[in-house]
Amino acid sequence: MRPKVLTKVITALVLAITSTCAFAVDKTDNKSTDIKVQNISSIEQKISLAKLDWTDASGGLALTGSTPKRNVQFYIKRDEIITDASLELYYTPSPSLIPTISQLNVYLNGLLQKSIPIKKEDLGVKNRVLIPIENYAIKDQNQFEFEFIGHYSDYCENPVNTTLWLNISSQTVLSLTKQKLHIANDLSSFPVPFFNVSTSEKSMLSFVFPEKIDNDMLKAASVIASFGGVITKWRGIDYPAFINQLPNNGHAVVFLTNDNRPDFLKDYPKVDAPSIEMADIKASQSDKLLIISAPTSEELIITAKALAVGNILFNGPKATVLDYKEIEKRKAYDAPEWINTQKQVTLGSLTDFDGQLSAQGFKPSPIDVTLSLPPDLYFVNGSHVDLNLVYKYSKPSSLGLSQLRLLINDHLIKSYPLKSDVETDSITENLPLIGNLNIFGQTQVDTSYLTAKNTLTFDFNYSSVFASKHNECTTQIPIPNRVEIDPSSTIDFSGLYHFTKMPNLALFWQSGYPFSIYADLQESAALISNSNDVTEITALLNCLGRIGAQLGYACTNIEIYANPQKSDVAKIADKDLLVIGDVPDFLRDDENATIVLNKTKQAISTSFNSNNPRAFDEDKKSVAQKITAKSEQGLGALVSFKSPLNSDRTVVAILADSSKGMANVNQNLIFNYNYVDAGGSLTVIKADQSRSYDVGESYYLGNLPWYQRVYYMLLESPWLLMLLCIFSSIVFCIFCYKLLKHIQNARLKKNNLRKAQ
């Protein structure tokens, strides 16, 4: 039987078995089913090489004599099956290669898919080859390996000769034909299929609400939304909201109580305890519902928290929360994704996968470690971080210079020689990782090496020496080098203060600050101006999903207030406020807030319509109560200012000129799928463009001893330091003069007494 025919037979059997299993589960649950056994429609997907992991900056792959093998990865969702696959490969070989004996081999998960001989007419030009992929070789996690075998001479070749190269173009495309599997209604597979945890694609999960949406229901949705961010991590997740209707396609989460439910679930049985159920969407062949139910809205929060903190034992189509115990609130700055700044941490604890701290090859790939830090750490010129590093490496040649380069965010910090007589070495350094950052002055220049998210790179470079005598050549097979960072190596950020200048939307954009000071958002409240506006609900959910991904913890203790009134002021006065939609009047009763909101209106109306990006600064005292400017594409804004209710608290508002503008902001809120940056106190967003401004009053959050402020001022002001030195010298001289004068007078007095006697 031919492979393609065999593949189709296997695919049909898998689909039949999966559908049968799903039917069996529902039958044992004594529920009516509408499971359809007919073929599920296929989906064609084309993925460019540039979108796969581990490609070069150009989106392609460069193969050379010293790096003849390169890998890229792609992933398949667990509820999908591949029925057909092919790789459209574009490559350009060096014109100096010897035809036929030079070749390119393509492997998938270790299985050879095609060996491509390089012919004379292929040299120096871009070539196209269509490679059919064997479906049975495709798994959830897949790796293409490209192996370049190149020769430029049949006598005495140098493997690092610059004529040995082959370039794989970013135009290379992987084509996949997929079918969704109709999986069984079994919560043991959670978070699949609702959250994507296998591919690099973002997740999209619709949230469906009944007509009446109260604060407790929104809080339950917020907890689950942030939990989804924790699960999907860097992939990003989008939460389109719907009221009393299902989305046209895709999985969905629906919220209901015994007395408040969407019309399409009006016959759903009443529940006696908070529950979670997985069910089919009847109009779809593969999409699923995650039903979050409880007797009351307040108990919906229990369901959401139990799901977020893992207090539910998933088994079968339905799970019930019988006994939920509230967990202890988080401490400040203890987000799971952040480095513990109270003690030394090991590099092994910062890894994301096995083997991350090792590499091999003629030129080993750089070893990267992610350092996620609290964004308000106080760094100044002269700050240092302790690093105790132990590393192992294969012995380099005694000829040439081999070295380890230490980089932070692509800034070279220091380099260390690799010794030819040892295989293990260690470094104990007080590294000057920090540049110069002025948070007290007005300068906008930020030269600090460290940000909220950082990459620590260990780059091992081996020198290679190849020599030959005339008419004499000895061929040697070079041995790949291997390098390792000991997981017990430590880095220490303890002893640093938490202190920063506000407002600063860059900190909110990068780390959810200041809400993220507590990972469970226990000192934060979200105000949504219109609970019936699905774009505002989506903005709330997407924002909290983003913060959940940044912190690695669900916002189990955030407070939600829909349609906030002045009577809510006492409850929210001591909280950082996330405002969605219009800013309530009780937050406008402040001159600074009024100025900032005025500038927001003017920025929205002029930022993308004027050649002068600061044209709105000309009138700083105009008064505006709402954003009324309109745009065909929709404009949105992120605004931050000191809370009028508490000088130690911050307001961050997500505003827009229309529903279209809010939808635009929603797309940019998706973690790792936004193309804009935020900064200052005001950022205006239009499509994939943004402009940031500094408007309104500055203030500081955190604690910094007075002597640290004086020290910082002296570092930044050499003239002040000189004057202080002169003043100190004068005071010291006066003190010494007085002291010596006193000693002299005492001695004279003593001598006079002796003479008198």
Image (tube, grey):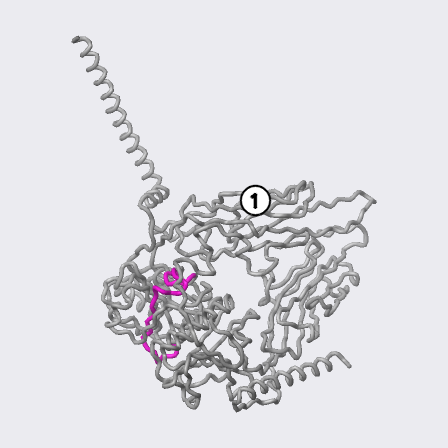
Q: Residue at x 58, y 74 (%)?
A: 77
Q: In the image, which residues are magenta? A: 511-535
Quarter of image, res 572: bottom left
| Image position, residue 244 (x, y; %) | 40, 85
Is residue 586 shown left or right of residue 43?
A: left
Quarter of image, res 578: bottom left
Tag 1 secondary structure: strand
The relative height of residue 697 versus residue 25 in the rendered view (above or below) is: above
Residue 662 visible in rendering: no
Is residue 12 shown left or right of residue 467?
A: left
Residue extending furthest toward the left: 756
Quarter of image, res 637: bottom left
Q: Would you name the residue on which mark 1 appears?
A: 415
Residue 102 is covered by the magenta coloring = no
Residue 534 is covered by the magenta coloring = yes
Where, quadrant-wise, is the N terminus in this rendering?
Answer: bottom right
The relative height of residue 284 versus residue 702 in the rendered view (above or below) is: below
| Image position, residue 662 (x, y; %) | 38, 74
Given residues 245 and 162, the one toward you in this image is: 245
Is residue 621 shown left or right of residue 191?
A: left
| Image position, residue 282 (x, y; %) | 51, 88
Residue 590 visible in rendering: yes
Residue extending furthest toward the right: 471
**Of the residues shown, which amino acid type is indicated by label 1?**
Ser
Neighbour tally class for label 1: few under 14, some 14-19, many 20 plus, Cα within 10 Å: some
Where, quadrant-wise, is the C terminus in this rendering?
Answer: top left
